[in-house]
Amino acid sequence: MSTFGIEEEFFIFDAETGMPAQPRHDPFQELLAAQRAGQVQQELLACQIEYASTVCQDRTEALSELRNFRMALAYHAERENLRVAGLGSAPMIPHQAPVLTDNQRYHEIGEFLSGITDEHYMCGLHIHVSIPDREAGVKALNFLRPWLPLLCALAANSPYWHGTDSKFSSWRTIHYRKWSVQGIPPHFGDAADYESRLARLASAEAVPDLGHIGWGIRLSENYPTIELRVADSQMRAHDSVLLAVLTRALVDTAIESITPEEPFYPEMLDLALWQAAKNGVHANQLDPRNGATISTRDLARRLLKLTEPALRESKDYDFAVHSLRNLLETGNGAVRQRAAFARGSISHLLENAHAEMQM
């Protein structure tokens, strides 16, 4: 059974205007002093904070750690009349260019991609799952490709953009298509093939460094892990952990699998990802195996059946079944954002998202 880690990105908002905000002083000073686990750092924009968990063995440990950090972050934000939220996109953004975090690499990205970074008010959830070696990692990469659209749909949490409903459940997924290397990765023959093609991409002028290779799933260059990147940031820690245990189960299933891989056309996978970003959980998905329409619920059942042995081994099966059922019945983050907006516009949406930080 693999271990896993969770990286969550959060927005900081002005409580009165609802606009992304830069804290008036270093937001990490007290947090870092009090934080006993994980790592806190700033993201590309000064209005963003990222928390990287420790290496987790089980969901209970992960949930406790994420909730403890979220509660501390919400407390420190409120002291400055700010709000924090796990949203995939900022519902409103300023007309002027954003303030970038004072980091050389971030300033280089801002210069290189100014038209993109000026509107890159996006936050994601990244899940790392341990792998025994790069060969096993490539096997898992290939195995997970057809499941990325469903994971995107479950995690969709960015419907609002420029103050209005984008009509997409995950606008973040659509926005990321502007970057040079995005979407679902190609099929790789083996680890050597992966490294060779990665090196070719990295040698291109349009790819300043390996961090710009932003596939929805990739092998980490810093840790012995496979990294899922297709998910929006989540309002609730519970949903982040659900996505983590499903991802771990898929990776463990892939590594243990002896079944020959099914062929998937890359254009169908790309279309399935687009449709998942559009529809979220309360509409149909595209079955990447044959291009047929399939309900999100039926696709989720197929995922549970496939990963049941791995989920039972990790003692996550009942949790996954109940949590998935609840998410499909009551809605994911995009559904809850729209419901909150209907009750009181953007300001109510942000207050609700801030409150959900501690759930």
Image (cartoon, rainbow, N blue to C red):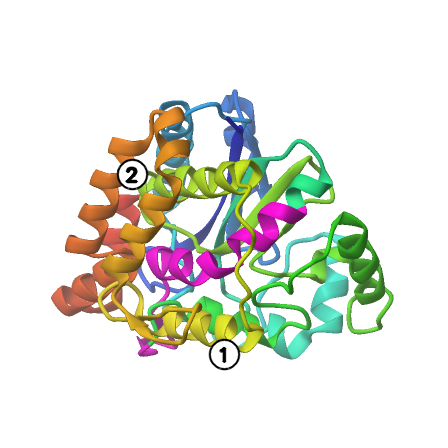
Q: Residue at x 34, y 42 (%)?
A: 78
Dots 1, 2 in contact, CB < 8 A: no
Say which element carries label 2.
Answer: helix
Query: Which quarter shows the C terminus?
Result: top left
- Asked which quadrant contains residue 44, the reply is bottom right
Reply above or below: 103 against 285. above
Q: Give the magenta part as a residue range.
A: 138-167
Q: Residue at x 55, y 70 (%)?
A: 176
Instruction: Please name the residue that numbered disc 1 is placed on.
Output: 95
How many numbered marks does the figure carry?
Answer: 2
Instruction: Please name the residue that numbered disc 2 is placed on.
Output: 320
Q: Is residue 125 left or right of residue 183?
A: left
Circle 1 packing at 10 Å, graded few (<14), some (14-19), many (20+), is: few
Residue 6: x percent and y percent?
Answer: 50, 38
| Magenta-colored stretch includes residue 140 | yes
- Is residue 93 in sight in this rendering? no
Q: Earlier in the sequence, mark 1 or mark 2?
A: 1
Q: Hey, what amino acid is under mark 1? A: His
Reply above or below: 11 against 306. below
- Asked which quadrant contains residue 165, the reply is bottom left
- The foreground one among 53 and 26 is 53
Q: Nearer the viewer, mark 1 or mark 2?
A: 2
| Magenta-colored stretch includes residue 107 | no
